[in-house]
Amino acid sequence: AQKITQTQPGMFVQEKEAVTLDCTYDTSDQSYGLFWYKQPSSGEMIFLIYQGSYDEQNATEGRYSLNFQKARKSANLVISASQLGDSAMYFCAMRVGSGDKLTFGTGTRLAVRP
Amino acid sequence: GAVVSQHPSWVICKSGTSVKIECRSLDFQATTMFWYRQFPKQSLMLMATSNEGSKATYEQGVEKDKFLINHASLTLSTLTVTSAHPEDSSFYICSARSFGGKYEQYFGPGTRLTVT
């Protein structure tokens, strides 16, 4: 069975600073994909970044980067230069093999302070 | 980017009635759609996988007779909550993966269901 663990229920960060949201995963499959989604208070899930298990380099998308440490089974999200609009829930998710099913973590609520 | 819509965005119904929620992919064809349920301050739980032209695959513990899913076309999937009860009150979110598209799933804006 697959499992995603997000141990930080809530985080604060000062505007313009960087923040790291933790995510660890557990799977016995060698092929998998890791995702981060942002969920603002309005409810929609916004795709942020993806990392494949065979990708050699850490994924980056603008201010978002994924610190992928395969041996430690961690896929932490780093948000640089935080903005007030970054305040939201952030979910880490995993897809295993060629399947489409996503397993989500419990989420981390990020609050950006002005 | 790919857009997924849901209708209605919120609905209030009385206990015992049925409610239908639509999920549409607006600018791409989705052979597979997913239905999730999210309780307040909790994570998304996959309810079922909906495939166009075939029966949905339900996750363990999800009552298929209570949550009817129909994927009638490549752009539309519906979730019907039958004989709704207050414990069915939740946020229901659909997602879709485009045929031949990239890896990510595109999520709809969600439907908040309140059963009184």
Image: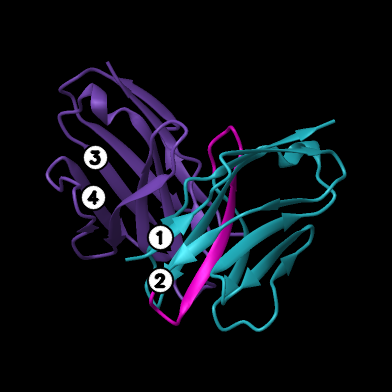
Chain colours: A cyan, B purple
**Which residue corresponds to the image point at 29% horizontal and 59% vertical from the top-left?**
B50
Q: Is residue A95 left or right of residue B57?
A: right
Residue A92 appears in the figure = yes
SS at mark 3 in the image: strand
Q: Amino acid at mark 1?
A: Lys
Could you confirm whether marks 3 and 2 are on the same chain?
no
- The magenta stretch is A27-44
Count of numbered circles in the view = 4
Q: Earlier in the sequence, mark 3 or mark 4?
A: 4
Instruction: Farthest residue to the left: give it.
Output: B65
> Which picture quadrant has residue B57?
bottom left
Depth check, front residue: A18 or A43: A18
B73 displayed left or right of A88: left
Q: Position of residue A38 (x, y in %)?
A: 61, 47
In the image, residue A17 sits, relative to residue B90, either above or below, namely below
Discs 1/4, front: 1
Which residue position is annotated with label 3? B80
**Which element type, helix, strand or loop, lies under badge 4?**
strand
Residue type indicated by callout 3 = Thr
Circle 2 crowding by C-alpha within 10 Å: few under 14, some 14–19, many from 20: some
Question: What subunit carries mark 2?
Answer: A
Residue beneath disc 1? A3
Q: Which mark is residue B83?
A: none
Which of these two is toward me, A65 or B100?
A65
The answer to which of marks 2 and 1 sits earlier in the sequence is: 1
Q: What secondary structure is found at the residue carrying circle 2? A: loop
Q: Which mark is residue B69?
A: 4
**Do the residues bearing badges 3 and 4 touch, measured as CB atoms within 8 Å?**
yes
User: Dot 3 falls on which chain?
Assistant: B
Measure the alpha-carbon separation of dots 3 and 1: 29 Å
